[in-house]
Image (cartoon, helix red, strand yellow):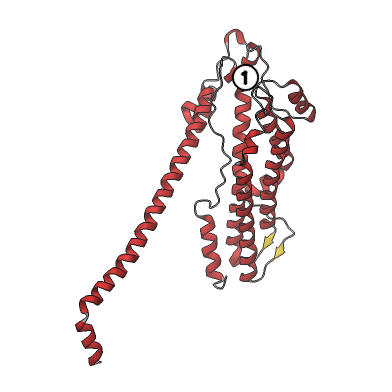
Amino acid sequence: MLLVVGVVITYFWWIVGAGALVGLYFVGRAVAREVQKRRELAEQKEYELKRRADRQHRWLLTGDSRGIYGQQGAAAMRDVAPQPSLPDGEDAPTQNPAPIARLAATSDEVAALVNDKPDAWGWALFTSILVQRTTPLLPRLRDSELGFSPAATTRLYTAAELATAVVGLIDDMLSTAHQLDSFMTAPAFMASFYGPADGAPPDAEAIKHIAHRTMDYHDRFLELSERCRSLSAPSEYTDILADCARLLDFPLQSYREFIGELVDVIESLPQVLQHATDDVDMGAIVLDIDLDGDGLRSRIFKRLDAINPSR
């Protein structure tokens, strides 16, 4: 004891200095994490503002009242003051002699788009295929949005079984999202909408191909949602399955928003292009998938750790 006391007295200031350095290390690490977190939040906020600005820019270009009054205010304004018609009661498409692409609802209309090649036919073709692939899935997509669980389910009895199943589903969602990102950011994706040389028309078969592949990823997300909702567990764990179902519906919500914005653009083209003399910048339309859902994924993992510490 005397020896220990003597060492402490002799090297007291060294011990204090070492303790201070250790404390500064942990404080510095915590500050660095907080700074990084704030930087990521700022970047995310800036990204969201840019997306909203592009969307509002499109609304203003098309004369959509949402560009002035917002989404909720526009609905009320349509009831109070309907959109004015053009002079002589004519619609914009009849005043523009150049044919402009419209959405194709059938295979014959798709073939007509490819054969006639009106203005913006490539994007109309891409959007039409996305809509045609989505329409038969609407009942299943509504079930996903509602979190509906079928009568026939796969029963999970233990916390370990539940953790394995839920983590596997979330990992499949993340993997599919990363594959989709690599697919849509590949140079060949956007190159499909432009001809191989200046002035050459886009490749219709390439556009069809990327549209179907884009929806193939959508179908994978839907299958993951259905797999989650087909699981059942003891009542004390049902909150985890409910959160999992909500999380796995986020990619489908992103697809709904993405396709909806594309449809809005295609339907507004006759009004936008009737007086255009050059290229029109409609802003970026992004398929942005939220992989955390405002902390929902983190909450699921914390809950799983609590019920299954050995995970």
In the rendered image, residue 249, in percent from the top left (x then y), is placed at 62, 49
279 relative to 105 in the view: left or right: left
The quarter of the picture where residue 139 lies is: top right
**Residue under the point 33% across and 61% down:** 28
**Residue under the point 56% across and 38% down:** 286
The quarter of the picture where residue 168 lies is: bottom right
Helix or strand or loop: what does disc 1 sit on? helix
Residue ID for mark 1? 270
Query: Mark 1 Cα within 10 Å, few/some/many (few <14, many 20+)?
Result: many
31 relative to 159 in the view: left or right: left
In the rendered image, residue 93, in percent from the top left (x then y), is placed at 64, 16
Closest to the observer: 202 or 180? Answer: 202
In the rendered image, residue 20, in percent from the top left (x then y), is placed at 27, 70
Which residue type does callout 1 highlight? Answer: Pro
In the rendered image, residue 287, in percent from the top left (x then y), is placed at 58, 40
Quarter placement of the C terminus: bottom right
Q: How many marks?
A: 1
Quarter placement of the N terminus: bottom left
Residue furthest out toward the right: 108
Residue furthest out toward the bottom: 2
Residue furthest out toward the top: 88
The quarter of the picture where residue 170 lies is: bottom right
218 w.r.t. 13: above or below: above
Closest to the observer: 96 or 248? Answer: 96
